[in-house]
Amino acid sequence: MQLPPLLQGDSLKRLIQGAAAGAVLTMILGFGWGGWQLQGKAQKAADLQTTAALVAALTPICVDRFQHSADAKATTVALAATESWKRDSFVEKGGWATFPGSSEPNRDVAEACACTLSDAK
């Protein structure tokens, strides 16, 4: 069986080199600019989006629980008197960022809640 001239001798070598160069170029363009991702990077992005959605959904609940607590006025004054970098800990200790089904407060929600309460003034 006779091979076509394209697959004979030096042409075969050039064809294989071109295919390899094309594959490498496709991967560089795909991963660099095309938005292709490996599973690990995609999972990290999904986790970040999940956390952001959770914080966005639970922060108003935390704020509402804080504002409707029995001693809301006193705790609002105490929160305002607390240094800004300790306010999330204040919200955590108050229990406003601990939700049913979890034994620990959600630190991200506590931070967003403290920021929201501080900005509301």
Image (cartoon, rainbow, N blue to C red):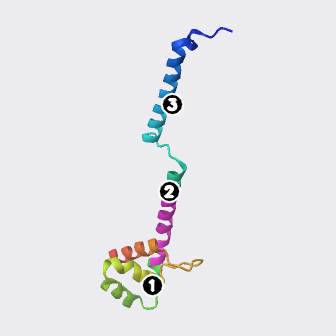
What is the C-alpha distance between the residues marked 2 and 1? Answer: 29 Å
Task: Tell me where the magenta segment starts and ends, as one range.
Answer: 45-62
Query: Mark 2 highlights which residue?
Result: 44
Query: Mark 1 highlights which residue?
Result: 93
Residue 121 seen in the current view = no
**As shown in the figure, which amino acid type bears the numbered disc 1?**
Lys
How crowded is the residue under tag 2: few (<14 C-alpha within 10 Å), some, or many (20+)? few
Give residue 113's position: percent from left, percent from top: 42, 75
Mark before the other along the chain sequence, 1 or 3: 3
Query: Mark 3 highlights which residue?
Result: 23
Give the residue at x 30% y 85%: 81
Which one is in front, 95 or 61? 95
Mark before the other along the chain sequence, 2 or 1: 2
Farthest residue, direction right: 1
| Mark identifier at residue 109 | none
Q: Is residue 119 above or below residue 34?
A: below
Residue 51 colored in magenta in the image: yes
* SS label for mark 2: helix
Left or right: residue 116 versus residue 5 is left
Single out the mark in the foreground, 1 or 3. Answer: 3
Image quarter of residue 85: bottom left
How crowded is the residue under tag 1: few (<14 C-alpha within 10 Å), some, or many (20+)? few
Single out the mark in the foreground, 2 or 1. Answer: 2
Give residue 84's position: percent from left, percent from top: 32, 78
Give residue 121's position: percent from left, percent from top: 31, 78
Residue 24 seen in the current view = yes
**As shown in the figure, which amino acid type bears the numbered disc 2?**
Lys
**As shown in the figure, which amino acid type bears the numbered disc 3?**
Ala
What is the C-alpha distance between the residues marked 2 and 3? Answer: 27 Å
Farthest residue, direction front: 9
